Image (cartoon, rainbow, N blue to C red):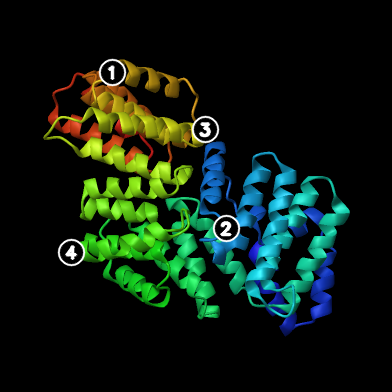
Amino acid sequence: MLHATCYMLHVPCFCREANDVTALLLLLQLPLEDRLNALECHFTWDLDPSQSKLYRLRDNLEDIGTEEGYSWLGHIYNLQGYVHYRLGSGDDAQRFFGMAAEAFRQMRNTVSDEGPWLVINYGNLAWLHYERGEQAESRDYLSQVDRLINEYPSASEIYAEKAWTLMHFGAGRRQQAAEYFQRAIRMQPDMVEWHTSYALTLFYQQRDQELEDDVLEKMRIARMHDPENLYLAALYLVARARKGQNVQVEARELAPGVLRKPVSSYSGIKPFLRLYRMHVSMDEAIDLAEDALGRHPDERYLKLCAALSYKMKIFLQVDSPLEESMVNRAISLCTEVISLYPQSSLKMKVALADIHAKSGHIVEADQLYEEMLEGNPEPEDAQMLYNCYAKYLHFVRQEIHRSIDYHMRAAEIPVPSKYRNNSIRTLRRVLERQRNRMCREIQEFLDNLQL
């Protein structure tokens, strides 16, 4: 079987060097499934998301909307189609793949309705029809893929869409995403949105570590060439603040523009509020979140952004008692967000439980955590939940041994994450103090842990 990248990215070059017709005939003689496996599309990129990740992706893509994500609209619809297929809806998948093809045609605004940007879309459709038992339709789309890659041998569009897709699959895929963006940009350096997404990918790669000067410079250049992108603008100010620069004046100047943008996760409102919470004023961040909600009271994404701001305000307030009105507003927003994101709101449920605990509602916090623990979460979600519950048991319930037990449960799930790292660090600190009767058990556990 030919490897995917060989078929999609290198065969055109081989065909030009040797015999186009002979190479194509060899490909056409492959069994249908081998030809499908050799495609470059969402079905062959080893994405393999969990069920909970699929629901989060579905909701995240819906929150982008169709206006702010315009330059990536075809890619958004392609990924939505794949997500809906994995969630069991072939009809929705076909609908979104059709919307992707139309979006690409409108966005490219070329004389021809077709181009290299449709290679992945047609590959997805070939796979979808194959999975639905429609082999004739699958072969038809495969023939269209063959025709496009011979007519448009450049792989830049494929690299760009693959990079953009991998961006949405967490920290473990960001290095790959950055590499594919680099390849696409080398082949087609005039695509502004590719430079922007490349800079953002590098920024998120270093989210939990010291930001390199080179990444900040790439963000500066991207900002210069993409001045209307307020998502990039907000994160560029966050990056500069992390390097010790005072950005309060610029943040306040940016506020009106962000609030005027159409509601979208690409509008910049979420990183902008984070910028305010961390580097300007927590109270002003809440005021801005409420201002945005006042303009668009029915938008679930803005309710999510406001809930996150209230959560951070409550968690970070240590020197003064919590105002009952603020706590009630936070609980109300979190509860509503959970209902608006019913299949992707586990983190918000944890936040709600911790808000109840911080405000003295221990019974409610206990009940929420018990419900979440009984929900049989998937490994990645379970790891996050165990880590948070361990902290709750330690700091709120004062149940130290149960807390250690849940830190061990979080650490033994072999999913790289900040939650696992935190639990491992906590267990090591307990060992260093040598004042807990579980030290021998912890030592044995850490010795046997696959790190």
Residue 441: image quadrant is top left
Q: Residues within 10 Å of mark 4 (few under 14, many from 20)?
A: some
Labelled pair 4, 2 in contact (Cβ < 8 Å):
no
Q: Give the residue at x 38% y 54%.
A: 269
Labelled pair 1, 2 in contact (Cβ < 8 Å):
no
Q: Position of residue 56 (x, y in %)?
A: 51, 42
Left or right: 316 in relation to 122: left
Give the alpha-carbon distance from disc 2 to disc 3, as whole Å.
22 Å
Residue 243: image quadrant is bottom left
Q: Nearer the viewer, mark 4 or mark 2?
A: 2
Give the alpha-carbon distance from disc 3 to disc 4, as whole Å.
39 Å
Mark 3: amino acid: Pro
Mark toward the start of the polypeptide (2 vs 3) = 2
What residue is disc 3 on? Answer: 342
Q: Position of residue 406 (x, y in %)?
A: 33, 25
Q: Position of residue 6 (x, y in %)?
A: 66, 68
Mark 4: amino acid: Asn
Give SS at disc 3.
Answer: loop
What residue is disc 1 on? Answer: 362
What residue is disc 2 on? Answer: 66
